[in-house]
Image: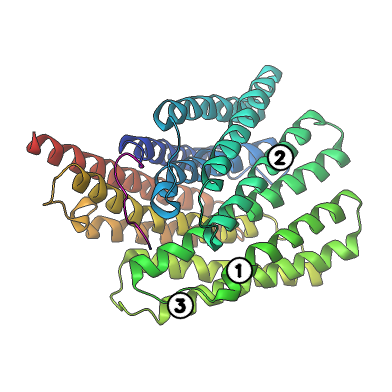
Amino acid sequence: MNMQGLSLDQAPPYETPLFYYMIGVFYLILFSLSLLIYGQTTEDRFYYESIAITHILTLGFFTHIMFGSLFQMVPVIIGESYKNVEPRAKMILISLNIGIVSFVSFFLFDIKIFMHIAMLFLVTTIIYFSIYSFLTIYKTVDKNQTVKTFLTALVFLAIGASFGLFSLLVHGAYIEDKKFGDIHFTFMIFGWIFLLLSGVAYKVIPMFYVAKEYPIFVKNYFYIIASALLISIAFATAYQYNLLLSALKILLAILTASFALVTINILKNRKRKRVDTTVNLWYFSMSNLFIASIMWIVSIVFNIELGFSFGVIFGLGFIYALINGMLYKIVPFLTWFHLSSAFVFDAEMSQVIKAKIMKMQFYIFTGSYIFFILALFYKPFVFVGATLFFVSSSLLLYNIINGYRYYNLLIKERK
């Protein structure tokens, strides 16, 4: 990866992404607690409690981590800096959290005013961030595959947020509400999160794991094929072309399964064969992506309702595990980078987050995942899964805070 000329003038302050990460992981703890309270009583994804719990994870954790990472990674990977990043990042953080708290409060306590506050703050914040990031990234001269994938993901983020707004506006008219909700879900999960993670993977895996690049065909056409499928799925959903919709979803599942297999193969054949927790999280994540994709195909062909199983395997097994693995690479890297830029040259990435605690957190998370799967067959196991996930999330927060403390300690020693 070309990092020539990178300096603190291009990167945001160290605290900017770290605050996003710490707040995001705090939402993981709230996610665990909400599962302990509501996990056994929610039977359907359309229950208000289910919607609230889902968005504590997606808006609370996924969004914070991805926004914070873009603030840091766009200058590093793309080579373009956000303008006035510090005040804008703070404004986005405050507005985003007002929206998230209001959204969750509405669905848990059914107080109408919270829905209006959520619509105002969430949608305007997400669309503002989308445009802000899109214009920043678009300035780069080198419109490579990662740039194009990032830009595409940001477009889906803005459109997906708009469909979320429509879903709230027509709330109560069940059929239309469900259509907008389904399109919102598809665009946000596959268009925003999945495409952004794929764009990051193109850079992160070769750089951190000394592995081969993704095949040119994948980097050049994956985001195009995925975008065409997602747009077609949206139209088929809106006009209720059910047979076409099923065929398009199967094609999307084949695409995601193929990406998982390609990634596993690249990792398996990497030059640096040393196995650590981050590699295990990548393998865990891609294996779950493949399993979820096959499950999705089977459910469509045989008309089986996946229920919460897809959420556990795809949401926690794939997306969460992958973000967890990326955090364990990004936090040490940006800590080392900022310290080096401040002329602190004795910083070591391996000391930012201790490998032993990293490994412990991964094992506890894996245990929680197993009990969440078992809870699909025997509901009370959700309490065990949620308790273990609470411990795992607390350890993740501890690890990130320790990285922040390591940075501050060396900065103070330099002074």
Give x and y (percent) for residue 93: 47, 30
Q: Nearer the viewer, residue 222 or 178?
A: 222
Say which label, 2 or 3, has the lower sequence index: 2
N-term mark: 3 or 1: 1
Name the spot of residue 343 as percent of width and height, x first: 14, 45
Foreground tag (2 vs 3): 3
Q: The magenta stretch spans which residues?
A: 2-10
Q: In this figure, which colouring scheme has been used for the structure?
A: rainbow
Left or right of residue 55: residue 343:
left
Q: Residues within 10 Å of mark 3 (few under 14, many from 20)?
A: some
- Residue beneath the point at 79% across and 29% down: 169
Residue farthest along the front direction in this orientation: 141
In the rendered view of the protein, which quadrant contains the N terminus?
bottom left
| Number of residues whose C-alpha sits closer than 10 Å to that of mark 2, classed few (under 14), some (14–19) or many (20 or more) | some
The answer to which of 29 and 284 lies nearer the viewer is 284
Nearest-to-viewer mark from 2 and 1: 1
* Residue beneath disc 2: 47
Q: Position of residue 2 (x, y in %)?
A: 37, 61
Identify the residue at image location x=68%, y=24%.
Answer: 115
Residue underneath mark 1: 220
Residue ID at (23%, 59%): 356
Looking at numbered disc 1 in the image, what kind of residue is underneath it? Asn
Q: Tell me the SS state at disc 2.
A: loop
Q: Which residue is mark 3?
A: 266
Residue 255 has which mark?
A: none
Quarter of the figure with the C terminus = top left
Within the magenta stretch, is there residue 5?
yes
Q: Is residue 270 left or right of residue 43?
A: left
